[in-house]
Image: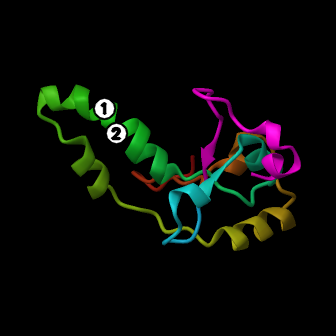
Amino acid sequence: AARLQRDPRAGALHSERVPYMVVCGTPNSRLVDLVVDPAEVLASKGRLRVNAQYYITKALIPPMERIFNLLGADIRRWYLEMPRLLLPPPSLRSVAETLSGGGGGIRKHLHCEVCVVCHSLA
């Protein structure tokens, strides 16, 4: 949106694919408000977190359902019944990362380092 405000010709052409990522936001946010350019996520230095819940339920579960339904397994129910690990708000985690020296690579984009199944450190 900012790029379009700077240059009206920067908008997407008809049938052009536009790269985007869905990030975490407030509970009642509209999906359109959570969509950002992938470069923004990388430049945010951990302030924007990828919305894993969205990608799991919209991109991963549907094809897995088509495969495992043939075997009689209900992937969506299994996912909904999985235990959830409560995480501190991102602002507190980013402050802790800053104080501890940060870290690099993909780890700074992951939600936690504890396995949700066995609760051991990953």
Mark 2 residue type: Ile
Q: How dense is the environment of label 2, judged by Cα within 10 Å: few (below 14), some, or many (20 and up)?
A: some
Position of residue 45 measured from the top left corner of the image (x, y, whole percent): 81, 54
Instruction: Measure how far apart labels 1 and 2 are at the Cα level.
Output: 5 Å
Quarter residue 46 falls in: bottom right
Horizontal side of residue 81 vs 34, given as left or right: left
Q: Which residue is mark 1?
A: 64
Position of residue 82 measured from the top left corner of the image (x, y, whole percent): 32, 55
Viewer-proximal residue among 6 and 91:
6
* Contact (Cβ within 8 Å) of mark 1 with mark 2: yes
Relative vertical location of residue 53 with respect to residue 10 in this rendering, above or below: below
Position of residue 83 measured from the top left corner of the image (x, y, whole percent): 35, 60
Give the SS element for disc 2. helix
Viewer-proximal residue among 113 and 29:
29
Q: Which mark is residue 61?
A: 2
Position of residue 42 measured from the top left corner of the image (x, y, whole percent): 78, 45
Q: Which residues are magenta?
A: 1-23
Is residue 73 part of the magenta span, yes or no?
Answer: no
**In this orientation, does residue 103 appear?**
no
Viewer-proximal residue among 79 and 36:
36
Horizontal side of residue 74 vs 25, given as left or right: left
Horizontal side of residue 76 vs 34, given as left or right: left
Q: Which mark is residue 106?
A: none
